[in-house]
Amino acid sequence: MVLGFFGLGTGYLIYGPQELFHAPRRDAAVDRSTGVWGIFMPGLCQLLAGVYLFVGLTWFQVFQDKALFMAALAFSVYGIHWFALGWNRYRQSDARPNGGMSVAFVIISVLGMVVFFGVGAWPVGLLFAGLTAVYVAEFFASVPIGGRTSSLAGKTMALGEKGLGLFHIATGLWLMYLTFATTLNITSGYSLPGG
């Protein structure tokens, strides 16, 4: 799980400042760079974590915690969707279709909150609360409410992008904490929450 936490956290900490502060400013070179980062850090790291968990849960049955099924599902689909996000950024594709994607990912994020808060794993439940906020903001950053050319649509999309950046940074920092806690708990016998 630590691989998935770290990969997504890194992606969020790359994308978040750009959305919130417009730093660095987007251009073709920056989009290619962030696209590659999006594919390989959050994309590949999460997909590997998800496949590993699914294989361990189903083929080899080495994991017994049923909540790990939700983790396997989430890591897999979030990883695959980051391949698309990274590729679209790399190619400077239109981001408006992300609005539809965000609806599906709000649903899976809420499902993750229900599962992890339900089993008492509040640090991971809190992660899914952050993910829910990310995808709600993604919707408003992507969908031109009020029409493509209206000033209302522009303001809603700008606020959505700022919110997306803020939630990317906050959730990315929480993911770094989960990476830290999990690693220390496993390697050094700590008992930090969320590890």
Image (spheres, helix red, strand yellow):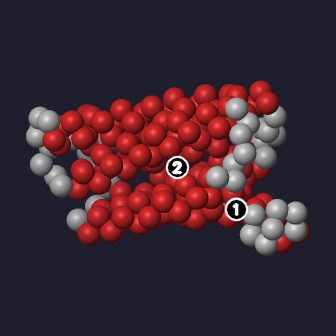
Q: What is the spatial separation of the Cα atoms under label 1 and label 2, in whole angstroms?
A: 27 Å
Seen at 29% across and 64% down, the residue is 115
The residue type indicated by label 2 comes to Leu
The residue type indicated by label 1 comes to Val
Residue 51 position within the rendered picture, expressed as x and y whole percent measured from the top left:
30, 36
Residue for badge 2: 173
Determine if residue 65 is in view. yes
Q: Which badge, 1 or 2, comes first in the chain's sequence?
A: 1
Residue 184 position within the rendered picture, expressed as x and y whole percent measured from the top left:
31, 39
Residue 40 position within the rendered picture, expressed as x and y whole percent measured from the top left:
51, 29
Report the disc number at residue 143.
Answer: 1
| Relative to 39, 125 lies left or right | left
Q: Nearer the viewer, residue 78 or 147?
A: 147
| Relative to 57, 77 lies left or right | right
| Relative to 57, 128 lies left or right | right
- Res 30 → quadrant: top right
Dot 2: element: helix
In the image, residue 169 above or below residue 40? below
Q: In the picture, which quadrant includes the N terminus? A: top left
Dot 1: element: loop
Residue neighbourhood size for the residue with mark 1, other residues' Cα within 10 Å, grouped as few (<14), some (14–19), many (≥20): many
Q: Comparing marks 1 and 2, which lies closer to the viewer?
A: 1
Report the disc number at residue 168.
Answer: none
